[in-house]
Image (cartoon, helix red, strand yellow):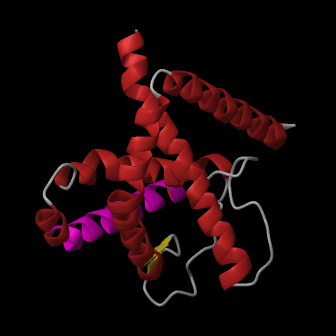
Amino acid sequence: MKKVVDKISPYIIYFMLYAMIGWLYEVFLEVVVYKWGFSNRGVLFGPWLPVYGFGALLFIFVVYRLIKGKPLKTKIIMIPVVFILCMLSATLLELMTSYLCEFFLGSWPWQTYKDYKYNFQARIALSPSIRFGLGGVAFLYLLQPLFEKLVLRLKEKKNIVSIVILLILITDLICTVLSKIL
């Protein structure tokens, strides 16, 4: 059992780090770029967006293996491929998430893309997809190597950290669901 926890723990930590970065990114866009004012951008109460955590894990499991441990020259040559794969996978994840949210919540929690020139059902659009591709490249080339070092430094504490993260996320999910039905 400990071996399973040791293998899963880093990914729980990565999930939370990227979910928090996603929340910060969305709030930055909302407050600084679009000047709409602050609102909690997430479906949960806390400052995290699970879709970014899932997107990052998707990048790690599907795309990161193409560059991890490779020579710098190979990594540089792979940037366009990584960009396209991240763009496509994140866009597909956003589309699927919009359908799931609409089914379970009645709508999806992000703005519709109806005003974007190139969009599909106002659920996904080219401009955000390009940003997802760029973000994926930044995640995999810059942040993920740093996060891996961080998790390595945690050693045995990583299991405790991941359990605390899971408890926080489960508590937030329960509170969010209860607030919707009560």
Looking at the image, which residue is at 70% across and 81% down? Answer: 32
Q: Is residue 55 magenta?
A: no
Residue 129 drawn at (x, y percent): 41, 73
Looking at the image, which residue is at 74% across and 77% down? Answer: 31
Looking at the image, which residue is at 28% across and 70% down? Answer: 83
Of residues 81 and 107, which is closer to you in this image? 81
Q: Is residue 11 visible?
A: no
Which quadrant would the N terminus be assigned to in this image? top left
Residue that sits furthest to the front in the current view:
153
Residue 108 drawn at (x, y percent): 62, 60
Residue that sits furthest to the right in the current view:
182
Q: Is residue 82 magenta?
A: yes
Name the magenta segment's main secondary structure: helix
Residue that sits furthest to the top in the current view:
1
Residue 28 drawn at (x, y percent): 66, 73
The answer to whether residue 64 is left or right of residue 109 is left
Q: Is residue 64 visible?
A: yes
The answer to whether residue 23 is left or right of residue 179 is left
Residue 13 drawn at (x, y percent): 51, 38
Asked where in the image residue 6 lies, by quadrant, the reply is top left
Asked where in the image residue 92 lies, by quadrant, the reply is bottom left
The answer to whether residue 172 is left or right of residue 71 is right
Looking at the image, which residue is at 64% across and 72% down? Answer: 111
- Total marks in image: 0
Which quadrant would the C terminus be assigned to in this image? top right
Magenta stretch, residue numbers: 78-98
The answer to whether residue 144 is left or right of residue 71 is right
